[in-house]
Amino acid sequence: MSLAVDFAPAAVVARLEAVEVRRGGAVALHPLEWQIHAGERWVVIGANGAGKSTLLATVAGAMRPTSGRVHVLGEYLDDADLDELLPRVGWASAYLADLLPADELVLDVVLTASQACLCRAEEDYPAVDVARACELLSWVGARRLIERPFGTLSEGERKRVQLARALMTDPELLLLDEPAAGLDLGGREALLRTLSRLAEDPDGPVQVLVSHHVEEIPSGITHALLLREGRVVAAGPIASALTSASLSATFGMPLRVLSSNGRWTARIA
C-alpha cells in the first residue's frame, strides 16, 4: 500500500500565526505560534480542556480562529478553496465519528471519504477506490468488518475504521484527535502498533496526534506540543519538550517522565 507523500526538504506543512480561539466569551486558545514541517510527527499533550481538540479542529479547517492566520499545505485557510484543500488533510475525531450514520456499512464509511461526504447515496465509486478502501481496512486490521454497519462496531473497531477513512485520500497531513481514547489495554496497544507503523514510515504523511496520556504516544513521534489552559507550555523535539518539568507544569502536579524503546510513561514524582 502506498502512503508516499512528496515534500521539499523542511517544507512548512502548517503554520499558525498568533492564532486565538474564543468560545462563548471564554478563551479556548490564547494567541500561539506553531509550525509543522515535512517529516515531522507531532503529539499534542494536555489535560481535558487544555485546548487540544480546538487546536486540531482549527488546523483541520473545521473551526475558524477568532484572530490570527492558519496556513495549511501552502494555503491561507480564509482564502483557500476548501473543497480542493481538505481532501489533502486526513482527520479523525469523536466529533466526526458521531456524524457518520450508524447504519452505513464500514466499506462505505471509508469510501465516502474520497468524495468528502458522510454517507453513500447513489454514487458509483470506481474499482480503484473500492480496492484502496479494502486495502486500508486490511492494513488497519479491520478487513473482516467490511460488511458490518458502523453502529454495531466496538470502540476499538470504530477507531480502526476511522483511521482507514482518514487515510483514504492519501493525505499529506493526518490529524488524529485522541485515537486511543476509550479503548481497553489490548485495544489501545493494537491500535498503537498500527499508529507506530504509520509514524515510523518515512514516506507516510505528516502526523499530528492529540492525547492527554503519554502512554498513548506511539513510537515514531518526533515532536511534542504541551498545552495548559490554552497556552503553550513547551514545544519542540519530543526528547527536549516532553520532560518531567514540562509535563509537571502542564498538569499542575509533580510528575516523572520515563521513556523506553520509543514509548513513554508518567508517574507522580
Image: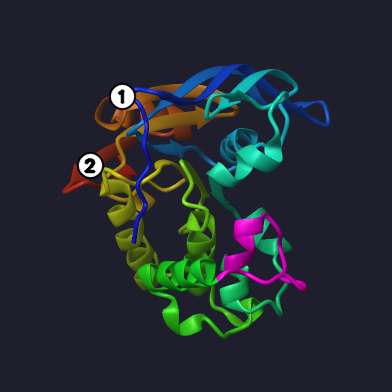
At x 42%, y 48%, the residue is 213
Whether residue 197 sits left or right of residue 3 in the image: it is left
Magenta range: 111-126
Answer with the quarter of the image where residue 50 lies: top right
Q: Position of residue 77 (x, y in %)?
A: 67, 27
Q: Position of residue 149 (x, y in %)?
A: 63, 82
Looking at the image, what colour scheme do you see? Answer: rainbow
Q: Position of residue 141 (x, y in %)?
A: 38, 73
Q: Position of residue 202 (x, y in %)?
A: 26, 43
Which residue is identified by label 2? 258
Residue neighbourhood size for the residue with mark 2, other residues' Cα within 10 Å, grouped as few (<14), some (14–19), many (≥20): some
Which residue is identified by label 1? 9
Whether residue 25 sits left or right of residue 184 in the image: it is right
Q: Is residue 263 above or below residue 59?
A: below
Whether residue 151 sits left or right of residue 211 in the image: it is right
Q: Mark 1 is on which residue type?
A: Pro
At x 37%, y 26%, the residue is 246
Instruction: Confirm whether the magenta stretch covers residue 124.
Output: yes
Task: Name the front one of labels 1 and 2.
Answer: 1
